[in-house]
Each structure stands twice: as C-alpha cells, then as structure tokens.
Image: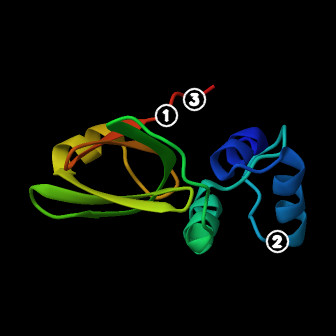
Amino acid sequence: MRISEVAELMAVSDDTVRRWLDSGRLDPGAGDGPRTVDAASVARLMAEEAHVPTPLVQQSARNRFPGIVTRVEKDGVMALVEIQAGPHRVTSLLSRESADELGLAPGVRAAAVIKSTNVVVELEEHR
C-alpha cells in the first residue's frame, strides 16, 4: 500500500506513517520503487488501535466505513469477513462465492456499507 493510502485509512499524516515504518510499528512493502507499506501490518495496527475513541459525527441512514480486511473465515457455502474501519470492527456474513469473487483476504482494502441490519462489502478503488 502507498504511504498516502495508509495515512488516509488511519487518519494520520504521511509523516506519521513514515515514522511508524522507521520504528518498526509498520512493516515495509516488498519491491523496488517508491516506499510502500505491507497491508497485513496495517491491518494488525488498525486492529490494535481499535480501542481509540473518535469524535461522534452525524451520519445518514446508509453508513459507509472504509477500512481493511483483518479476517476471512470460509466454509462450504458462507464466509465471515471482518473489516477494521478506524476504531470500528465490522463483521459481515456473505456467500463464499462473493468473498472469492471479491478476492477478500487480510490486508485487502474494503468498505463496509451498512443499511439497517445488512452489511455490504465493497472494494476500494485503487488509485
């Protein structure tokens, strides 16, 4: 993941993400070129930081929580998907086929869209 993507997800500055990389709090991504962050380490840090309270803001009936997938459990027909969206941990039960088609796995950027009691999982557009 790009440093700017991690900063946006975690609501911190790019410099904070760089400091976390330098201190070992986040793991660097693989490959040459611009500095990146390992998505699984972002998921781990977001899960650790989930207890940090955030200010309450007004929201519409249709809530959208962008975050990162932290857990996927699949059986024959269904899949349980957990998304860490800032301090919120959202869990969705969806078909295994849907989870496979979306390529859901820990470290994948996704958003939980909640309307009433239904949670819909979306993939974030990659820039």
Q: Pointers 2 and 3 in contact (CB under 8 A)?
A: no
Rendered location of residue 103, percent (x, y): 36, 43
Could you tell me which residue is drawn at 18 percent across and 44 percent down?
A: 97
Q: Pointers 3 and 1 in contact (CB under 8 A)?
A: yes
Rendered location of residue 101, percent (x, y): 28, 38
Q: Which amino acid, mark 2?
A: Gly
Image quarter of residue 53: bottom right
Helix, strand, or loop for circle 1? loop
Q: Earlier in the sequence, mark 1 or mark 2?
A: 2
The residue labelled by disc 1 is 124
CA gap, disc 3 and disc 1:
6 Å
Q: Nearer the viewer, mark 1 or mark 2?
A: 1
Rendered location of residue 93, percent (x, y): 20, 56
Q: Earlier in the sequence, mark 2 or mark 3?
A: 2
Residue 109 visible from this viewpoint: no
The residue labelled by disc 2 is 24
Helix, strand, or loop for circle 3? loop
Q: Pointers 1 and 2 in contact (CB under 8 A)?
A: no
Between 50 and 39, the one lying in front of the other is 50
From the image, which quarter does the N terminus lie in? top right
| 123 horizontally vs 53: left or right | left
- Location of residue 5 with respect to 96 vertically, above or below: above
The residue labelled by disc 3 is 126
Helix, strand, or loop for circle 2? loop
CA gap, disc 1 and disc 2:
26 Å
Image quarter of residue 5: top right
CA gap, disc 2 and disc 3:
25 Å
Q: Residue furthest left?
A: 77
| 82 horizontally vs 17: left or right | left
